[in-house]
Amino acid sequence: MPASNLLVIDDEPAIRQVLSAVLTKAGYFVDSAAGAVEARAKLMRGDVDVALCDIKMPDGNGIELLRDTRAAGIETVFVMITAMASLDTAVEALRAGAFDYLVKPVRNEELIHRLEQIEDIRGLREENRVLRKVVGERSVPVFRFGSPSMLEVERLVGKVAPTNSTVLIVGESGTGKGVLAHSIHERSTRRDGSFVSVNCSAIPEQLMESEFFGHTKGSFTGADRARKGLFLEADKGTLFLDEIGELSLQMQTKLLHAIEHKQVRAVGSEQTRQIDTRIIAATSRQLPTMVAQCSFREDLFFRLSMFQIAIPPLRERQADIRALIRFLLESSREGSNGIDIDAEAESYLLAYPWPGNVRELDNVINRAHILAENNCITVADLPSNLVDAVSPKMVAAGDDVDEEGLRRQLRKKEIEIVCSAVRRAEGDRRLAARRLGISLSSLYRKLGETVPS
């Protein structure tokens, strides 16, 4: 069913009524205007997809209205309607930028056919955009996990990806929640649609509604042109909401309404838009605890966690670390220049607890690659805080430590690293978390403290 917003512009009430009824029945969202003045006000909001516009009106000319709309930077498609089969009028309308023109009385079949042509052209443009993106992207190697916990994660991804279910991905900062979300999209029936990612903690509260649902031109100070919003950008695709726990309660309510009713309304608009957008959310926070503290809506939590995937931290999946090191070394090759790592440096990487998870490991490998002499990474190329955090005894013990004993030692060293970072930041936990590359809530959790409200 079409999801376009249409505006019928005609000074004859009967024509407005008939066309509106026909188009509404065909599945379009329809508004109307009785003349050029009223139509200009509605067009300038920027949320009209197609305008069916009479050329001759008592208070203005349809072609001038088209020109004014184009001059304002608004991309509404115009189909002109005229009572006279005048070639001159038609040519003038087309030169002004009209898609086509129809002669009164308008036949319903012809009108629907014109609108279908417009939908097809817009669909081809989107398809070309996707193809350009696919062709322009170089092939990216895929990492294959070896740990039982991540093999289970991959199994869950394979089960949920082909469905339209919402997905909630939970895990510490740096574990790869965004990569997993993109993998779900690529393995879904929506892979030819857009994958739109947004970090909810990065959007100012006053702009949140506009970013999510769009806005019309002039709806607030600074809105110099209309914006579609993230939901419409991800229509027929996937919207990834990272750090969903950072949303305010007010925005949580609006998000829940959009998910449940599959409709959005831009700020400043009177029209609702139907959407077909899959939601994947992620968080490093404990949402059940937030629900208990009334800082996260329980109904939204249940809606998002219809299918939940938990990514374990890197320190709990030793089987992946060595393979990840090799994978990242291979990925960091530039041209024909290979890069390797000596046994001692690798031992340090294997013993380190990785509080910043895969993101921190990736940063360490990239940094070491830059510093490495003779294309071989040594201990001297590793960050000093990493080397200081790993005792020679841990490196030597390495393979002799059983998995549970290793986890306890890693947990102890992780706490030591976090406490040291807090001391160096003179008690500023937010600064310490930023230096460690983890979220503030993760730092409090590692210290066994409660996040202040």
Image (cartoon, helix red, strand yellow):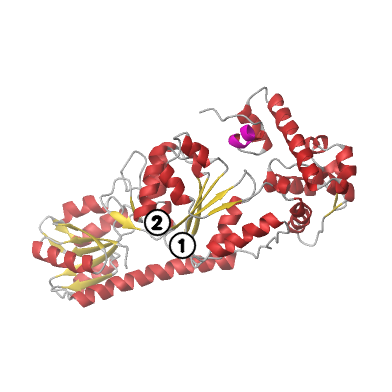
* Residue 423 relative to residue 227: left or right: right
Q: Mark 1 points at which residue?
A: 164
Q: Can residue 362 be seen in this view?
A: yes
Q: Nearer the viewer, residue 175 or 340?
A: 175
Going from N to C along the chain, the mark reached first, 1 or 2, is 1
Residue at 75 percent of width and 45 percent of height: 364
Q: Mark 2 points at which residue?
A: 232
Q: Nearer the viewer, residue 398 or 327?
A: 398
Residue at 63 percent of width and 30 percent of height: 431
Rate crowding at label 1 as few (under 14), some (14 to 19) or many (20 or more) other CA atoms within 10 Å: some
* Residue 60 relative to residue 136: left or right: left
> What amino acid is at disc 1?
Asn
Q: Which of 375 and 410 is in front in this view?
A: 410
The magenta stretch is 441-445
Relative to residue 117, is residue 165 depicted above or below?
Answer: above
Q: Name the outermost residue toward the top.
A: 426
Q: Position of residue 224 (x, y in %)?
A: 35, 45
The N terminus lies in quadrant: bottom left
Residue at mark 1 to residue at mark 2: CA–CA distance = 17 Å
Can you tell which of label 1 and label 2 is closer to the viewer? 1
Q: Can residue 378 be seen in this view?
A: no
Q: Where is residue 65 in the image (x, y as percent from the top left)?
A: 22, 57
* Residue 248 relative to residue 394: left or right: left
Residue 256 magenta = no
Q: Nearer the viewer, residue 303 or 323?
A: 303
> What amino acid is at disc 2?
Leu
Q: Position of residue 169 (x, y in %)?
A: 56, 51
Relative to residue 344, is residue 393 depicted above or below?
Answer: above
Rate crowding at label 2 as few (under 14), some (14 to 19) or many (20 or more) other CA atoms within 10 Å: many
